[in-house]
Image (spheres, rainbow, N blue to C red):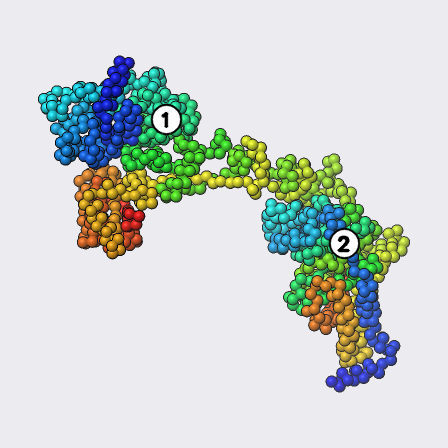
Amino acid sequence: MSTNSKTSQSANQGASARLKRILITEDSPVTQDILKLVLSTKGHEVHIAHNGKAALKMLLEEPFDLALMDYHLPDLSGAEVVAAFFKERRPDNEPIFIAMTADPDAFNATGTVRDAFVRVFAKPFDFNELLDFMGTLATGAHQPARARREEHAAGVAPSAPVNSPAPNASTADEEYEGTPDRVVSLRARPSGYEHNRPLFWPQDIGPAGFSLGARKHMASGGDYDMVVVSEPARVEDLRHLWSLGDLNLLPIIDETGHLGHKADVDLPKIPRGSAERIVQALVQEFAEARASVHLEVRQSDDLADKLLASLYVRSRKLMPEFSGASPRGFSYNVALTESEVRELTGRLETDRLIEKAFVDRLHGCPACNSVRLNVREECFECHSPNLEETAIIHHFKCAYQGPLQDFKHGSDLVCPKCARELRHFGVDYDKPGNVVSCLACGASSSDTAVGFKCLDCGVHTDGDVISTHDVFNYALTDKGRAFIEEGYIVTGATQNQLKFADLPLDLVIALNKAARDYTESARPFCLVTIGYPQRRIQLSEHGPRLVELSRRQLGENLKNYFGDAVTIRQGTDFDYLLIDRMAAENFRANIETYDEAAQSSLKIDLAPRFSVFGPGELFG
Amino acid sequence: MSDLTQALDYITAQSFESLMVLTAVVIIFEIPRYFGLFLLALLTPRPPGRSLESTYKHKVSVILAGHNERDSVRRCIASMREQSRPPDEIVVFSDGSTDGMEKVLRELLEAGEIDRALWSDLRGGKSAGFNICQRMASGDILINIDCDCSLDRDAFRRIVEPFEDPAVGSVAGNIQVRNAGSGLIATMQAIEYMITIALGKQGALAIDQVICSSGGYSAFRKSALESVGGCDAGGGEDLDVTMRLRARGWKIGFRVDSVCYTDVPDTFAGLVRQRFRWERDAVRLRYRKHRFNLNPFDPRFRINEVLHHLEYLIFNILAAAIMPFYLIWLFATYGAFAFVILLGLQVVLVLIDFPVFLLAAWLTPHVKAFRLIPYMFGFSVFNGFVMRFVRLAAYADEWVFQSSFQDSYVPQKVHDIRSN
């Protein structure tokens, strides 16, 4: 272990000089961040590509010394990128490729392309190993690409344990630096995290941030499945989960019970026997849900996006839970502070990504905002709560009417006006109502005022001027859900521009032409993106063939419907429709008709989502 | 036509003595009363205005007891808030209202428009309502007002001024008619109120004969009220309490320039019901409860009180009682001429009423009296005949049936037990 780090240090110094420009192609935001952080501090110039296309573009445009490729990318696979690169590259552009994959078997099955990679690291990999390897590369130990390929072809295995991911987990455990007591605590736990990879508070992620071990684990492409809070923590302590990659989308298992509903599992409240099952199920659920979150959203640095994704993955509403523990009186079931939630929900609601529903109205102290108030019935005059309610007595005979105490004479009732004794209720007298007397100032009324006294700061406020604020719950809207699944394209022009880079090339050309016509002769056009938010369900229900066929049929239908005016292109996630001479408003107005036309004679319901962009929205 | 000329011939042929006999009823029962008032009012100097500051020497509480007054209480309170001398405290009592009046009171209380709001679930009647307000109010001067009244801007300022005199126990306000335009009946009452209240009480004030601090609008010294125990059970509590204050030696004032408006009945039936109630209560109070005033051997006997009793006896009861006999005699003696004679009397009465009315109008310059003038021609018929018969019926009713003990203005539980 110690020798390891020493060698890596010396090797790294040389590595930074020789392997100056590094491209990291990685879709996991966490791995991205960590790799970039670590390699930058070692003196490398690190560039990031989020997907295969971007990587290819960058590789072709500028020379890199080293390319760390995640093998599984959302669009092109690492193999495809490398293959395309070798087809189009300039001869002098010869970076060293290193592959990272969680599935080395699949990688090995890709055939010849894998030979383009100098080395394959199985995720999660030992970060020191990577650094060491980079060190050896820097000292010139690596062979030319051709020689490598020959070597592979001859059956010489690369030095690393490419095809044995199972021992890897245990290795990682042993070498875990940040939590020396981790093995012990893990074993001691009834919930049995041994199947999972937990991120521990405060061992891995403490008040100061991430431990070195955690960083290395993440930098080596290692995932975490959950966050385990093993010592009392506040929401503020978990702040780092929201700053690095998509760690905010991990389930939070609270072993202490301090986080309450802000955690996903409140372990002390769960029966011992079922803890493991519940945690396992939750980890599984979260992992599946995370996979549905669009990469753009997972990579977003915007806390609002993160909150939205968090709601999506946790598949729950943002619900207030009332409690006297905080002066605010409630907290939301998310590991953020209430002021953060207020600000973020405000923005998300404006964008209609979430919708709010009224839950309750709280009264707050105007001085300190605390809702911990004593609500009192008070005297209208002096605001004293020292009130006494007595009956009014009406003496029929002399018409004297006043509070009971006027009549009290020992155990008898004697009229203060005519000194007659009141003997018979209903005949001599009755009690027509009540009067509340203030024992502090002597005032009387049939009614009392309502006042508030703050238990935190002691300030008194009259009932009619007390400040109120409403508490809402927040749920994802369809638009919000679509945004999570399909990325920024859903939110349209207002927030994020449609990314032209994502469009098929010939569509971009057609779009440019249409735009030129629009500026020259004001000929309207609109670009329609067709998303399939339920494609995962459809794929699992009907299989890829039928879905693909239906999608193609949908395109055909639209082509027939619009005729020559339309250009249709099929993309990976989206299909695109460029319609000449049609304004975006017109399309929106008739969207139901078009939807019907598009889906006519389709075997399955694709539930397509149309997003329409006019020239203004595309270029404005 | 020939009848008329014959009649006129006949009248002009009469000697002075026989003319006097003919017009005796008018001469005895109308002229002295109003001409007396006329002269008195003319001679009484208008009350001097005092500085506004002087009215702040007293703490002034308004007491307002009402039954089912949800709709009118707001306007009444608003007109109080508009006073040049606003009250220091407003106490409102909802007497067993079933129209949600207490909700309005609650709102007014929360808004700070009133200071005390009390309500009961069972109706106790006006006297009991007045008494609990008196009990709960903290001012030295209590202004009692009906919910359906509204006030001139300086009404409170003026009604408080007479309390400078420590002997004054109560001051009556000048109640006038707000709905004078809503029909002949209401218009006639507008003239009546001008003459009997503005002029009548102003005249009475000169000889210390203000007998009633009316329940509609008047002010009381709290200590004076406490000395008599507030209102007693039964109707006519305003007259009763005023007479008891007088019996205790308190002076009763009147301010002609403290004007309050109220709505009067605008149907004949409504008017009759109201007057039955008033007159019955007056008879009951004067000749049952307060008859000691007429007994020279009673220690409470005072000449001052005899005066108003006599006035009431002669000008109200006797004048009403004699009317049928006079008419019968007139018709028996003169046959068809009687109509002409009566007509002639009316002409004379109108001639008397005019200066009287003008004087009343002069006394209350803020009340718009001008538009009432055309109705003066009918007023003498209304007042001299119609109302006189109404009164007569009321007296008979009370005398024979003691109907005031069935009056729905007072709850039955109170009727059952009160003695007088």
Q: Which residue is mark 1?
A: A253
Q: Is residue B37 above or below residue B119?
A: below
Considering every residue shown, the one lying at the far top of the view is A3
What residue is at 68 percent from the left and 43 percent from the top?
A392
Q: CA distance from mark 1 to mark 2?
A: 83 Å
The residue most toward the bottom is B2
Chain letter behind tag 2? B
Location of residue B347 (image quadrant): bottom right
Q: Residue furthest front?
A: A17
Q: Dot 2: few (<14), some (14–19), or many (≥20) neighbours within 10 Å?
A: few
The foreground one among B275 and B364 is B364
* Residue A125 vertical position relative to residue A62 in the rendered view, above or below: above
Quarter occupied by residue A506: top left
Dot 1 and dot 2 within a common chain: no
Circle 1 — which element?
Answer: strand
Examine the rendering and report whether any part of residue B402 can be seen. Answer: no
From the viewer's perspective, is A204 left or right of B44?
left
Amino acid, disc 2:
Arg
Q: Amino acid at mark 1?
A: Ile
- Tell me what residue is drawn at x 18 percent, y 26 percent: A96
For marks 1 and 2, give the one nearer the viewer: 2
User: Which residue position holds label 2?
Assistant: B50
User: Along the horizontal axis of the image, is A55 left or right of A400?
Assistant: left
Residue A373, compared with residue A167, is above or below; it is below
